[in-house]
Image (spheres, helix red, strand yellow):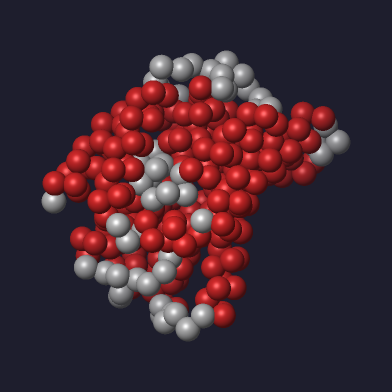
Amino acid sequence: MGVFEAILLGSLQGLTEFLPVSSSGHLVIGQELLGIHVPGNAFEVVLHVGTLFSVLAVFWSDIVGFLRTLQDKSTRNYILALAFGTVPAVICGLFFKDAIQSAFDNVNFVAGALVCTGIILFVGKCFTGNKDQVSIRNGFLIGIAQAVAIIPGISRSGLTITIGLCLGVKSDSAARFSFLLSIPVISGAGLLTALDLLESNEPLLSIPVLIAGFFSSFIVGWISLKWLLSLLQSGKFCWFGFYCVGIGILVWII
């Protein structure tokens, strides 16, 4: 993989990470179209870390606000909801790592998962939430959805926000919780991958390639996240369902 391909894939990651279309699924398809095969998922994690910095940049004021109001009960409950919501993905990542990694090499599996994502988004259209706060119980349930979305082709943002809507949470509050929930999971995945690479004989990508992928995913991710947050206000979130079903069927046919 060269720098140009890394920028293309990083931009693809940044564009699709926050949109409910599964960034992991698109990375699998993108590598297939470019004729690239990168052993393992280290490159995908580097791109996810790039979009992690996008989340930190957009929600920095929220994070600082949490630190300033830790004495407030509602803030502590919100942080506990994020903590409990992180547990399912951690368990899934530790015990099903090999099965998940093998799914990244199966394009047909990803195509089917994209169709499932489209159906999930259509279901979300049927629910309208009215709760501003996410309870600890609901945080854990949304966390289970996040764990399921580790599967490439299942959109993390699409599934977690839809489950939030089904639990009665407002769309903007569900989106805010969903993206904040991604911070500990992506951070942990990046750390574990780095440790695995130090212990393995897996060939490493060049530093320029990694830097190009990281910064392209960060910049495009920041732009797409800001756009999605404004799009949620218009109620057009489910429109991405048509795209997911269409691209899934197209990949199946091809």
Would residue 161 appear left or right of 209 to someone viewing this image?
right
Q: Quadrant of residue 203?
A: bottom left
Q: Is residue 2 above or below residue 22?
A: below
Q: Is residue 199 above or below residue 58?
A: below
Give the percent coordinates (x, y) of residue 39. 37, 72
Front residue (pair 93, 28): 93
Q: Quadrant of residue 76?
A: top right
Decide if residue 223 is in sight here.
Answer: no
The residue sitting at 27% across, 46% down in the picture is 111
Q: Is residue 32 above or below residue 67?
A: below
Decide if residue 167 is in sight here.
Answer: yes
Would residue 96 appear left or right of 6 to someone viewing this image?
right
Give the percent coordinates (x, y) of residue 33. 20, 60
The residue sitting at 56% across, 22% down in the picture is 167
Would residue 171 appear left or right of 123 to someone viewing this image?
right
The residue sitting at 42% across, 49% down in the picture is 151
